[in-house]
């Protein structure tokens, strides 16, 4: 296992047209993919987005939610990607992806699906949400009780006898303890649900391995939210699952400039360092 400085060094010496890369802990080297001929398909996609002003242009019956208008609103634009592949018979297949959700939707016709088990997620979500709601209600009622007890104690300190003061102090302490416990319960539950959710990301690579993102992400700083949702992992996962061999990958930004002013309309970008690089080495392995 190399350290991060060595990995950065290897990445810096990659060919200039490398668009997708990451360190593979199994091979102890950086795997990468270049742009290949995919830029052409990316330009075609851009033109289609501009012309149709929606992303569900494969369906005869457009849904308003898939309009690209949202990319020019407050939330800003979004990353899109194309992956040029060949199938077992040597035919060219071009896959397309949008990063994360498009306007609250994980799936749209003509685009690769997310890398996590969407059905499993949809089954889990209502249960998790109702549990979190229950814990939030619990915190609120504990808070009310604690406030009441504190007031009572303050009153007793002003005008009550010693016995009443002692009693109120005890009650107040108990209520505050219950409140702290209720908060801790919700925190613990949220943290554990996060790893349950992340475990739904079962990433496939080109050696035929399928692994949870929890075992793929090799940096020990915790897995950032949205890892596995960028275009590159979505495209590679879909290619691996469908027996396609990737040849070139291009990602571009489309829409209003982001808040940090690091992403601009119709500009091309390589895979991101935080969320993608720590999983792309594994995902490209076997190519
Ligand atoms: Zn990324
Ligand atoms: Zn490898």
Image (tube, helix red, strand yellow):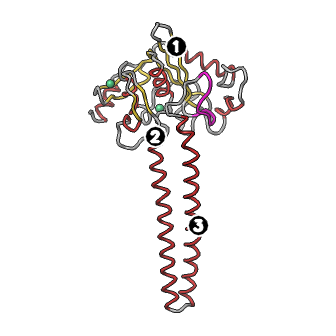
Asked whether disc 1 touches disc 3, contact meaning CB atoms under 8 Å apart, the reply is no
- Comparing marks 1 and 3, which lies closer to the viewer? 3
Q: Answer few, some or many: residues within 10 Å of disc 2's Cα (few below 14, many 20 plus, some between 14 and 19).
A: many
Q: Nearer the viewer, residue 16 or 286?
A: 286
- Residue under numbered circle 1: 93
Badge 1 crowding class, 10 Å Cα cut-off, few under 14, some 14 to 19, many 20 or more, is some
Q: Residue furthest left?
A: 1
Question: Mark 1: which secondary structure?
Answer: strand
x, y (%) of residue 44?
59, 15
Quadrant containing the N terminus in the rendered view: top left
Which residue was labeled with disc 3?
141
Q: Are marks 1 and 2 in contact (CB under 8 Å)?
A: no
Tell me the quarter of the image containing the C terminus. Answer: top left
Tell me: 284 left or right of 57.
left
Of mark 1 and mark 2, the one earlier in the sequence is 1
In primary-sequence order, the first of circles 1 and 3 is 1
Q: Dot 3, crowdedness within 10 Å: few (<14), some or many (≥20)?
A: some
Main SS class of the magenta portion in the image = loop
Give the image quarter of residue 75: top right
Q: Is mark 1 within 8 Å of ligand 1?
A: no
Mark found first going from the N terminus, 3 or 2: 3
Residue hosting label 2? 198
Q: Is residue 72 above or below residue 159?
A: above
Q: Are marks 3 and 2 in contact (CB under 8 Å)?
A: no
Residue at position x 46%, y 22% in the image: 241
**Magenta stretch in the rendered image:** 101-110
Residue at disc 2, CB closer than 8 Å to ligand 1: no
Residue farthest toward the bottom in the current orientation of the protein: 161
Residue at image coords 58%, 31%: 78
């Amino acid at each position: 296992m190399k350290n991060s400085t060595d990995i950065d060094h290897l990445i810096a010496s990659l060919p200039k047209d490398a668009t997708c890369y990451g360190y593979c802990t199994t091979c102890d080297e950086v795997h990468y993919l270049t742009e290949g001929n995919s830029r052409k398909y990316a330009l075609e996609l851009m033109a289609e987005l501009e012309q149709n002003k929606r992303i569900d242009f494969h369906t005869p019956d457009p849904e308003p939610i898939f309009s690209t208008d949202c990319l020019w609103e407050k939330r800003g634009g979004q990353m899109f990607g194309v992956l040029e592949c060949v199938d077992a018979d040597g035919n060219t297949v071009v896959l397309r992806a949008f990063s994360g959700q498009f306007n609250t939707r994980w799936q749209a016709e003509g685009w690769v699906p997310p890398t996590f088990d969407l059905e499993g997620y949809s089954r889990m979500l209502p249960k998790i949400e109702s549990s979190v709601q229950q814990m939030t209600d619990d915190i609120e009622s504990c808070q009310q009780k604690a406030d009441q007890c504190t007031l009572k104690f303050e009153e007793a300190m002003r005008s009550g006898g010693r016995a009443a003061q002692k009693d109120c102090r005890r009650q107040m302490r108990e209520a505050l303890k219950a409140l702290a416990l209720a908060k801790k319960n919700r925190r613990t539950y949220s943290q554990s649900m996060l790893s349950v959710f992340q475990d739904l990301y079962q990433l496939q690579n080109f050696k035929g391995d399928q692994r949870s993102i929890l075992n793929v992400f090799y940096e020990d700083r915790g897995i950032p939210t949205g890892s596995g949702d960028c275009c590159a992992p979505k495209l590679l996962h879909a290619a691996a699952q469908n027996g396609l061999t990737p040849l070139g990958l291009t990602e571009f930004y489309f829409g209003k400039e982001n808040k940090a002013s690091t992403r601009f309309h119709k500009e091309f970008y390589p895979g991101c360092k935080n969320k993608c690089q720590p999983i792309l080495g594994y995902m490209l392995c076997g190519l």
